[in-house]
Amino acid sequence: MTQLGVGIIGCGNISAAYCRLAPMFKALSVKAVADINMDAARARADEFRLRAETVDDLLRASDIDVIVNLTIPAVHFAVTKSILEAGKHAYSEKPLVLTLSEAETLRELAASRNLSVGSAPDTFLGGAHQQARAAIDAGQAGKIIGGTCHVMGHGMESWHPNPDFFYQPGAGPVLDIGPYYVTNLLQLIGPVKSVAALATTTFPERTIGNGDRMGEKVPVNTATNIHALLEFANGATVTLGASWDVWADRHSNMELYGEDASLFVPDPNFFGGVVEIGGQDQQITALPDWDHPFGIANEGDRANYRCAGLADMAAAIAEGRPHRCSIDLAVHAVDVMTSILKAGEERRFVNLSTTCARPAALSPDQARALLA
């Protein structure tokens, strides 16, 4: 398999995971990192024996084929646009961008230059979520008619030393954590047709509980408690609760209800976990063990295969096929999430203007083929 030279823009915490995990995949060869803060770039480069570049130099580097955008979401659009304008493929952390118009602009630019754009999350390629996909595709649950998803907690201020961004427009639980849930729903059920939502902000400010700014108040300027209803093109209706206003809950992360059985899917924020099924006998049992490499614990008791989506994109470029974490999937996910926020603000149903095909399933053998 042909290796693509990989560069990274943005040397924050998440860049360490990309640098650490990329060598697991045969199509990826990380060459250099860049950041507007050269001290951060040099520190990350020294840690992983890479080159430290300025952003402009990385965009011009002849040995870089694809650049991973790990900057803050507010500048995702500008940075990914610059990557494409430099003639390189782009892969972005989630969310791809913060507005649908930005997403469609990137799609048009990439198409005009025959370049590929990918976007996290790639956790839906994990063993658990691909097992759920295989069960649905095999008809084990029958046609999916509904479901529930919940991502509940009390935000980041208790542990994050600088949580300001999470509570401003462009963040909040829908755009920050929602991509994992929405993207998994899209690969399991298909595209969304319309959404409705109620959205509130319970706490006007948050108190930082860690680090040098401990005790400082952070203003909250975005919805933090959102309850949405998603209508899928196949007729399924799914409720999505996303809240940073909840101290404790007992909701399952994701339940999908079929005409013949219900599927219980683990947290889509992670690659692994146990998928359960319950049918007419009302007994809920785990699906049989499945030998999918992206479900095997590789960091303590957790499966972590970040870069799987990037590796699949690199392989797809070499093989001339569509990749799974595609621009079309990311654009539709952005449409779903921003439409939820609009529906919550305006207290009405919003019809989506985009759609997408379900990404191809990733079998155990196909996953193994990506690994070094």
Image (cartoon, rainbow, N blue to C red):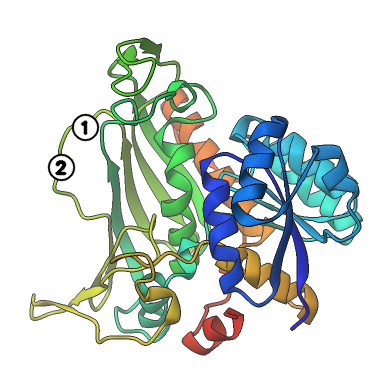
Residue located at (38% from left, 75% from top): 295
Q: Residues within 10 Å of mark 1 (few under 14, many from 20)?
A: some
Residue 186, image x, y percentages: 49, 61
Q: Which mark is residue 67?
A: none
Q: Amino acid at mark 2?
A: Asp
Quadrant where the C terminus lies? bottom right
Residue located at (35% from left, 72% from top): 128
Residue beneath label 1, please?
246
* Res. 322 visible in picture: no
Query: Image quadrant of residue 287?
Result: bottom left
- Is mark 1 in CB contact (under 8 Å) with mark 2? yes
* Res. 82 visible in picture: yes
Q: Which mark is residue 249?
A: 2
Residue located at (74% from left, 77% from top): 321
Q: Amino acid at mark 1?
A: Val
Residue 235, image x, y percentages: 42, 61
Residue 61, image x, y percentages: 88, 52
Of the pair 226 and 131, the residue shown nearer to us = 131
